Image (spheres, grey):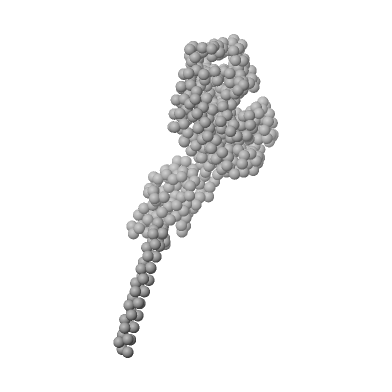
Amino acid sequence: MEVLLTKLIYIAGRFLRISMFIVSCMLIGLSIQSCSKTESIPPIESEDDSLIFESFHFEQKNNPQFAKDVVFDIQANSLNGQLKHYNYTAIPSFTTNAKSVKINGIDQVSGSSSVDYRKTIVYTLTSDRGTSKTYQIKIAWDNALAHIEFTTEGNVDVTSKTEYVATDIRIDGQTKFSDFEGQAQIRGRGNSTWSLPKKPYKFKLNDDAELLGLAAEKDWILLANFLDGTHMMNAVGMKIAQLLEMPFTNHIIPVEVSLNGRYLGAFMLTEQVEVKTNRVDIGKDGVLLNVDRNYDEPWQFRSSAFDLPVTVKYPKEIDAEVLTEIKTEFQAFEDLVERDDFATTDYLDYLDASSFVNYLIVYMLIGNEEINHPKSTYMYKTEEGKYTMGPVWDFDWAFAFEGSLVHFSRYDRPLFWSPPSKGTQFFSKILTDPAIKTLLKDTWFDFKASHLPELLTYIDDYAFIVQGARARDYNLWSQGNANYDTDVSNLKNWLANRANWMDKSIGAL
């Protein structure tokens, strides 16, 4: 009996050891399998609350765009402060007891590292022991633009394109620009745009003055952009010309405007196209022409070969004899272009080829077809110089609006019309010159590689700055998409598609 009992105990013990071995193997297998599935997930660690930002602020000495230092309120895991949309990029100064401070693994140096605060920014503080703590930036944004306020004499409204109204003018630069107060005259302006509900304006200061960082002069334009839901089409057109280094290209400053205490929405402040030292600086003996079917200047003529409506913007004080001299010189140029063999003539002794090609690139890329009518097609020359295309102007009907009345409707519409209009006949003829074709190809492909990414970045930056004013404008006028991001995305996508289309179109010339 004892022997039997001993054997049973031995068998049971062995069975238990085998069972435990099997169970252990299973547990080990599960552990290995579990580790293989979660090896990319780090263990959860609590933050080290002993790590702190002792101070966090933007010093004016490191950020000249600020009117004064901006101090952030430091809380448990957040840095809270106020910034204007103008100042979305800044260099912070901070003190901390941490060994290192990083954003997305990149070291941050107090008083040196520039940060774009439009993005979600999380600072990670790390100690000597490897413990860490995070702080998220939380910004209360101020999206007000520089504000121009007109108070007319007797609080009368501005109802005429020809009659000026006396007005006080006050500009709040929102610390981005210098404030201004003065006296001026204001009237309406524009052709088709004056008939729209939201009116554009021209104002003339009593004395020359710098406004919002632009060079001192008396005459200024406020573009209403009623048709433009993006509120940046004119800015994009001017930016392209600036990237092409076209002389005398206008600057665009987004602003908000009030008239006699009534808020009118978002506008663009820009220079009047005129011959002045700080505008189109071509000297007192230069000539500024506008080829424009509106044909509404005191001194003007129609060319004989292409029947172009040429208006003389400068000189202002001329007589019939001077007009004849201007017409004769232009006619000599046009007569050469009319010839079947014009490309073999010396017509380029009259025309600056680079300016012509740059002008076409601006108008092709944004689909501004006004060159065909023609309308708002400027050219200038110094006393001894060539005709130079520019300054570029008026992009309300660009971006496929012409012919469709819908912006961004199609990106593959040719610049020149068929059948041709008067402007089409003249300017497209010049493009048939092999030398102009080659120059256009070289200039375009260089621009696309060197500057198109910069242009798209400019659009993002501009959109961020104006988004608050655009929302306020939309509440007044209901133009564009309710979601501003949609308008901006449509603009960028259209430009990208248009650029690819231009590769094929220009490459096939």
Residue lying at the far bottom in this picture: please name it: 1
The quarter of the picture where residue 485 lies is top right
Residue occupying the point 62% across, 21% down: 419
Q: How far across and how far down the image is residue 132, in percent?
A: 39, 57
Q: In the rendered view of the protein, which quadrant contains the N terminus? A: bottom left
Work out whether residue 409 or residue 151 is closer to the camera in this orientation and state it. Answer: 409
x and y, in percent, of residue 178 in the image: 52, 37
Along the line of sight, the residue nearer the viewer: 17 or 214: 17
Above or below residue 60? Residue 276 is above
Q: Residue at x 61, y 41 (%)?
A: 481
Q: 480 or 161, which lies in front?
A: 480
Above or below, 42 against 507 in this view is below
Q: Is residue 222 visible?
A: no
Give percent across and percent down for residue 82.
51, 49
Residue depicted at x 46% and y 57%: 77
| Residue 168 versus residue 302 in the image, above or below | below
Q: Residue at x 57, y 18 (%)?
A: 426
* Residue 235: x %, y % from top left: 54, 33
Q: Nearer the viewer, residue 445 or 169?
A: 445
Residue 99 seen from this side:
yes
Q: Is residue 20 left or right of residue 85?
A: left
User: Is 266 on the left or on the right of 23, as rendered?
Assistant: right
